[in-house]
Amino acid sequence: MSASTPSFEQGPIRPPSEAHSLLVRVIRNCTWNRCTFCPVYKGSGSSLRPLEDVLADVDAMAAAAAVLEERGVGAIHSGLVPQEAYQVALFLQDGGRTVFLQDADPCAVKPEKLTAVIRRVRERFPSVDRVTTYGRASTLARRTAPQLALLVEAGLTRVHLGLESGADEVLMAIDKGCNSGDLIAAGENVVCAGLELCFYLMPGLGGRAAAAAHVAGSARVIRAVAAAAPGERPLVVRLRTAAVVPGTPLAEREAAGEFVLPDDVEVAQELRDLLGQLGDARLELRSDHALNLLPGLEGSLPADRGRLIALLDEFLVLPRDEQARYAVGARLGIYRSLADRLDAQRRATLEQQFGGYGQPSADELLEAATALRARFL
């Protein structure tokens, strides 16, 4: 049976915090697509979608939503709506409150065009209270206050921006296409326009050689942007521990011996150093991805800094073999917190994973845990 409502496009990714958002594809793939660590858009070209096509997609989603509200998710299986309407069903299940504009840099679209998309979204889905998007630093650093004001007036509320690192040497090594000055300018432009800003920081991305520079540069950028954010909308920093994905340029550098990914102990030390260098910066720290070793590493800074440092120290003072076993357990989904390593059943489940491997050393286990990160990308 053919679908009774029109089909519509959806891009490949969205932030974890947008899992139940309506996904509106404004631009295809990534306009830059050179970041050495990113596997998502490699081999795919970028293109701007015609405005009429994007608006038609929003209308198609609204049509699918009407059927889903009447018939439920069975409408997907019976062909009354297209398969991609599953995301619409998730959106409705969550109250129809959030929308995410795809793909990598919808902010590269002319503000007038993006404004038209946001307005159509809010017209068709009046229950929406949050509209968010990805944005690249090089794009947002060039946006003027009047251009960003157009988006705010239309109803954009949040921008997700890949900080990755604030160190210029690391940004150059990963071919990010921007420098620390661009990151600060972009962040300040966004928060001063009245938008929420989520920075994505990648601990470990500097490799072992540039770990100190990575921490210092990142702390400097975060402090500068956090200082510009108003009290009612503090900067949000989301952690995404670095991983090396096969087939990426970063994997080629690793194979050539030009990059060594820090293990989980080294990453924990980076994070402890970062917390120390953030000083009294006011921000919200989030650890909302499976790549991160310690999901509990989140809170409001500076108020929670002592608690977060204590959590890192709890891991860092463990015997190396215990650190390594916890890292593997966390990567396998057996452990979700440091307290879980004290649970006899969970520990027995972990030890079963080592059957047939003899007694691997702590270094071997940490190397395995580091390699397992790539499973989550």
Image (tube, rainbow, N blue to C red):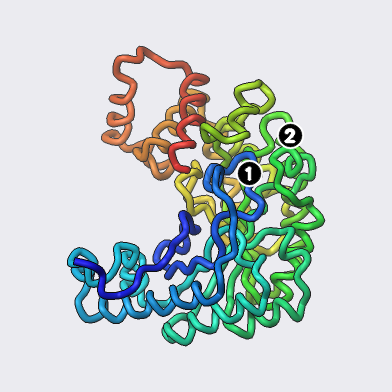
- Does residue 330 appear to the left or right of 241 in the view shown? left
Quarter of the image where one finds residue 316: top right
SS assignment at label 2? loop
Where is residue 196 drawn, in percent x and y?
62, 71
Q: In this view, does 304 lie above or below 92?
A: above
The residue lying at 47 percent from left, 62 percent from top is 17
What amino acid is found at the position of numbered circle 2 in the picture? Answer: Ala
Whether label 1 touches label 2, CB < 8 Å: no
- Near mark 1 (Cα within 10 A), the count class, few <14, some 14-19 or many ≥20, is many
Q: Where is residue 273 in the image (x, y as percent from the top left)?
A: 69, 42
Q: Which of marks 1 and 2 is nearer the N terminus?
A: 2
In this orientation, does residue 280 appear? no
Report the side of 370 relative to 217 (left or right).
left
User: Mark 1 sits on what residue?
Assistant: 271
Say above or below: 318 vs 156. Answer: above
Compute the Cα span from label 1 to label 2: 14 Å
Image quarter hosting the N terminus? bottom left
Observer able to see residue 153: yes
Spot the residue most to the top.
358
Instruction: Tell me the number on the disc at residue 157.
Output: none
Check residue 210 in the rendering and tell me which mark sits there, or answer none: 2
